[in-house]
Amino acid sequence: DASASAFFEFNVDKSRGDHRLLKLGSCWGGWDGNGNNPSYHSPGAYRAMRDFQMSFPASDRNGYSGVSTAEWDKLVITTYGLLQAVQCSDDGAMVPNWCTVGVDANNNIYHTGGSFSGSGTPQYEYGSEAARATFRVALDAAFYPEMALFWSPYLSSFHFRLDSTFGGSGWPSDTTFPNCRGPNTLSDISIFSSWESNTFIYGPTYSSLIAASTNIANAQAMTDAAGRILASSLPSSYYPRCWAMISNLVLNGAMESAGKTLRQ
């Protein structure tokens, strides 16, 4: 409970009206030229912290206060505003590793198109940073399936792209996610090279299938294919191995079960 309050106090920018924007840490990141990273934002985790704080006895807090439900909800709404602003148009699905976002005269979040990068990853790539965003939205779908109004627009673009090139047992590397461009930018987003062979890209990307609509004819077949791919031998190196395990937990229903436990 105290950690959740500290997180909101030191890692959330509250300077733009009702927007509550996650920073990249207590000392950097935020609006405009300060830069941001779509993959840092985790709306399902924010809802879980909100619900935990709602159930936590205020009398047990010593020297701090809980964050109101309204403030947590503003953080969720701002998060999805950022993702909408930076995601490729026309069902291109991908988001960049890094971005710059601002607020326009109508109080809407938009991609300012500025230059920003960190950790040695290209800004306009759906790579080892950006792919995490897809997992984090899928986590919201697993924990809070009734909140589809929020997570479905983001994930449905991935469902469209995966369905468009599905071959029965997997996906081609060069046509599933062609280069695409988000609003207000002059640079295309490209996918990490050989993404289908790198667990830290395909794992979080396949996790989107947890919320694939039954209106998609291949929905179950794609989920099964992704499960078979993830069920292969675990990678030996740390980062891909972690994503194989985490993505398996999403697709096999474990995260949905965890979400039910969180709300008991």
Image (cartoon, helix red, strand yellow):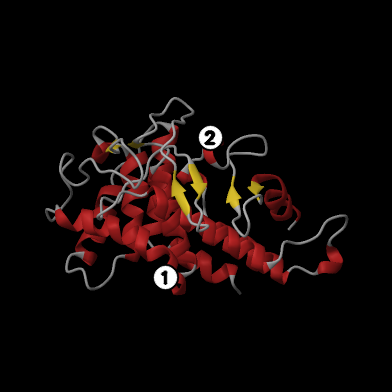
Q: Residue at x 22, y 59 (%)?
A: 160
**Mark 2 burial class by Cα count in 10 Å: few <14, some 14-19, many 20+:** some
Identify the residue shown where x is 64% and y is 61%.
49
Q: Is residue 231 visible?
A: no
The C terminus - image quarter: bottom right
Q: Position of residue 37 (x, y in %)?
A: 48, 41
Q: Earlier in the sequence, mark 2 or mark 1?
A: 2
- Tell me the quadrant of the picture where the N terminus can be found: bottom right
Q: Is residue 177 above or below residue 256?
A: above
Residue sitting at the far top: 120
Q: Which residue is mark 2?
A: 33
Instruction: Tell me how far mark 2 sits from mark 1, CA to CA.
Output: 30 Å
User: Disc 1 marks which residue?
Assistant: 149
Position above or below: 89 against 188: below
User: Can you give x and y, in whole percent of width and height, for residue 17 in the image?
Assistant: 63, 57
- Vertical placement of 19 versus 201: above or below? below
Secondary structure type for disc 1 = helix
Residue 104, percent across and down? 49, 51
